[in-house]
Amino acid sequence: MNPSPVDSAPDPTGAPSPSAPSPARRLFTLSFIALFFELMVIRWVPSEVRLVAYYANLMLVSSFLGLGIGAILANRGWQLFRLFPLFLAVDIGFLVALGGVSLPGSAGELRLSMVDHRALNYLALFLVFSLNALVFVPLGEQIGLQFQRLPPLRAYVWDLLGSLAGTLAFGLFSLLHFSPVAGVAILIALVVVSDASARRARALALYALVFTAVVWSGQRDTMWWSPYYFITVRENRVKIDPTQQPGVGKAWFDEVRVSAPPANLGTMADPPLYSVRVNQDFYQMHGTVDPSRYTAGSVQQQLVAGHRAQYELPYRVIGQPARVLILGAGGGMDVETALLRGAQRVDAVEIDPVIPRLSARFNAAQPYANANVVLHIGDARAFLQKNRDLFDLVVFGHLDSQALFSYGNSLRLDGYTYTVEGFRAAFARVAPGGLLSVSFSVGQEWLAQKFTQMITLATGAEPLIYVNTGTITFMASKNPHLAPPAQVGAWQLRRAANKPVDLATDDWPYLYLQKRGIPSDYALVIGGLLTLSVGALLAFRGRGFGRPDGHFLFLGWGFMLLQTKSIGDCSLYFGTTWLVTTIVIAGVLLMVLLANWVTQHFLRNFHPWLYLPLFLSLATVLAIPRETILAQELGWRVAWTLTIVPLPIFFAGLIFSSTFRESPQPALAFGANLIGAMLGGFCEYLGMWVGSQALGAIVASAYGLSLLCALGQRRAAKLPLPLGGISLHSAPP
């Protein structure tokens, strides 16, 4: 392939020194750093700054914005990479200073630990977005420079290889032992080793300051990192109001820091209870629910008895089930209750592998060590899809998640578990005469309505509803002769009012949203950040976007939404786990690499007919209902995912590579593509309104607009449209 004019043009920042790494190797390293750093901030920032908890997608969007602007600025000669240490120090310093700031409340969405709407909170969110974008600009500039020094497709290969390596490295890092301290250390080490300017005294001093700030931010508690959460554990110590008569009503638990449990926790009398906090908010209790472990008549015994009553409620209705399934087993209190009620086998499903390990340390009952307990680490919905056993009692523990399951998606970790189809799958695992029990800290009347109607639709009968302060338990029975008690301790049987609500389904898996639509605070934040992004882009671009820019922008727009949809589909088929997400992202990059290889070896020119297989494969993916795929055996689901789902990505990759090769300014084209990915990230929030499948129409529209831009560009340049067969050759171009 003949180099483009840009390939042979002098480097605006000066030619690299003989000792400098080759452009290919530097591009690989920079792409590795960008992906690793991008995934790290998406993983770390929501746990450090509660303000970002349900806006984690914005960290991805701002990263693309920064990389895109940097690539567009590559030919300005500004040498922004020398400012990377300063930008990083400002960004990390702001995040550490902002740690613990809570999220503003929302009338249309249930969130934990909300605060009232405050202008300062939204301003802080805008600053988090802007500073994260700023720190990626120097990386984008350097990536753009390497694109100018290499033939376009060769540069693209090294960029993809670096991105793939960064994705796999971070996936392994996150699954085995994630730590912000280690992550920042890896980032700094990579930058210092790969760039001579990063070894100057001022840069090293700033990096030392950044590392110290991250280490300091992690010293506030004894902590653990799971694939999903930042976890801390505190001991609950009973406090009694000295001005009141002793009793349960005047006592409460006060949390204190703890580093390790007593050595004899499993056998001691009056063992402590522990609070597990995730991302700085209360999540669950770890401890025994057996009152006999405590001094008779003590306040501790009465408090523990109150806890047990909550877990024991379904057993007071159904009796003594022999086999129990617990979804969201957590610290094991549900498991221990089943054992105390005489269960002969308990299958416990928990998505987070760290939680059971903490239970083994901090739960005095040691429920997971019992021979009658089988622990399954994985997604609850995926377990229901692959398991065919029947259970006398199926219990939904408090799965209410405090994290999003994917870096590019606004769906929560338990999204596909709490849907009509999820409840239907769970009820199918209930044996004749058995019971399904779902407990939830509802907090909102509309959410109680949603649960009631979803379970009714899934099971064919209105559930029993037991209400206590702060918690509601819904039960669906397969025993037509069941006579439920009107009251069980403090729990009273109620009937729910039947008000219209939008039900959570696999296509619209938003249990926590009151109704379809984008909540006002999301709209405010997204609209403001989009305005900020477009303004920054226009200021740095220097001129309006033309057809070539539009072509690559819409390709990035469609590709980002297509990748997000692929992650959502595969998570429904195989579980909303970080492992599934990492595998899908790696698979997408491999498919794009394959498309690039095919372009280099077999496609001489871009051909508009390449859009035909793209639209046909996209229509196939969208036309086959996801429930049809979900109903198939595991082997068929794997086959569909490996053969059909990647096809639109492959054909989109062919279009990008063949047009990118012809671009006279590859850095600008690459920057426009990243900006399009940013806009696609913003569009993902439309799923809250239209659902997952309808996003496919937006994907098709984006690719249609890219085709129109490409055709318009050819007409403007008076290039012939190759409407015949595709030109093939066997040698690299």
Image: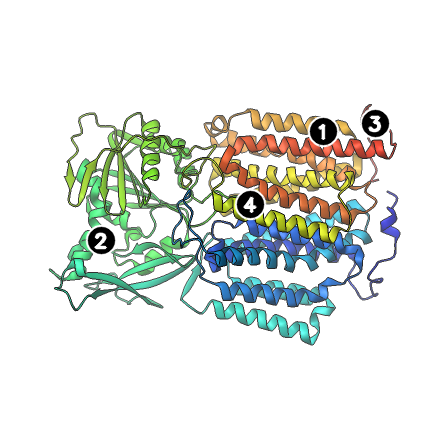
Classify mark 1: helix, strand or loop.
Answer: helix
Q: How crowded is mark 3: few (under 14 residues within 10 Å), some or many (20 or more)?
A: few
Residue 283, image x and y in percent? 36, 54
Q: Distance between the residues labelled 4 and 1?
A: 25 Å
> Which is more foreground, mark 2 or mark 4?
4
Real-space CA distance between mark 2 and mark 3, rounded to the nearest whole angstrom: 74 Å
Spot occupied by residue 326 in the image (x, y as percentages of width and height): 31, 42
Residue 554, compared with residue 172, is above or below; it is: above
* Tag nearer the camera, 2 or 3: 3
Q: Any mark on residue 408, and which? A: 4
Q: Earlier in the sequence, mark 3 or mark 4?
A: 4
Q: Which of 122 and 214 is in front in this view?
A: 122
Residue at 19% x, 63% y is: 270
Amino acid bearing label 1: Tyr
**In the rendered image, which residue does mark 1 sit on?**
611
Q: Is mark 2 on a helix, strand or loop?
A: loop
Identify the mark nearer the N-term, 2 or 3: 2
Mark 1, Cα crowd under 10 Å, few <14 / some 14-19 / many 20+, is some
Q: Earlier in the sequence, mark 2 or mark 4?
A: 2
User: Which residue is at 61% across, 45% downward?
Assistant: 586
Number of the front mark, 2 or 1? 1
The residue tagged 2 is: 289
Give the residue at mark 3. Answer: 722
> How far apart are the two marked residues, 2 and 4, measured between alpha carbons?
39 Å
Q: Are marks 3 and 4 in contact (CB under 8 Å)?
A: no
Looking at the image, which residue is at 83% across and 65% down? 17
Whole-angstrom CA distance, mark 3 to mark 4, is 37 Å
Helix, strand or loop at disc 4? Answer: loop
Query: Disc 4 marks which amino acid?
Result: Gly
